[in-house]
Amino acid sequence: MVVQAGLVRHLSMLVCVVAIPMGLAGCNSFALDDGIPNTSPPAVVVGPQNAPRPASLTLKSTGTYPTFGKPLTAANTQIDDQQYSSAETQLSSLAKAKARGAISEAEYQRRVNALRKLSEDQTSSATAPATN
């Protein structure tokens, strides 16, 4: 009787582990087939195509090789470190004087306008066409 009880217990456990999940799986309405084939599309072999070269990549034969040996020159002379330091000192002292209230707003605007006028004069002379 003890052997039969052990067998019943093993069979009932087997039913719980195997039969119940299989029965529940049969009740599931989940379907893998949705009407869309799951196969990969057929492979398309693409060979070389004869396309014209873009116009921007066409060869322009000038008869000379490009050279970067010449030193680059600016359109106008550049300021040196001493001139930069002088201008920076002048502008920062003007800003500090205005912040402390040492100069009036009218004096500050007069000096700023004078510096802008100087800048415009230098720009117009630098951009004027060169004459021989």
Image (cartoon, grey):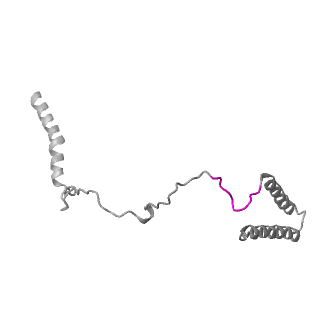
For the residue pair 109 and 127, the one nearer the viewer reads as: 127
x, y percent for residue 120: 77, 70
Would you say the magenta stretch is mainly helix, strand or loop? Answer: loop
Instruction: Indicate yes or no whether the magenta region holds residue 75.
Output: yes
Q: Is residue 13 above or below residue 34?
A: above
Q: Is residue 26 above or below residue 13?
A: below
For the residue pair 101 and 120, the one nearer the viewer reads as: 120
Q: Is residue 93 left or right of residue 15?
A: right
Instruction: Quadrant for the C terminus, please.
Output: bottom right
Q: Is residue 103 left or right of residue 60?
A: right
Instruction: Indicate yes or no whether the magenta region holds residue 3.
Output: no
Q: Is residue 60 left or right of residue 104?
A: left
For the residue pair 128 and 6, the one nearer the viewer reads as: 128
x, y percent for residue 124: 75, 70
The single residue placed furthest to the front in the displayed view is 63
Residue range corresponding to the magenta coloring: 70-79
Residue at 74% in and 58% down: 78
x, y percent for residue 24: 18, 50
Q: Is residue 49 above or below residue 120?
A: above
Residue at 69% in and 59% down: 74
For the residue pair 115 and 51, the one nearer the viewer reads as: 51
Q: Is residue 34 above or below residue 4?
A: below
Number of labels in the image equals 0
Instruction: Quadrant for the N terminus, please.
Output: top left
Q: Quadrant of residue 38?
A: bottom left
The single residue placed furthest to the top in the displayed view is 2
x, y percent for residue 85: 80, 53
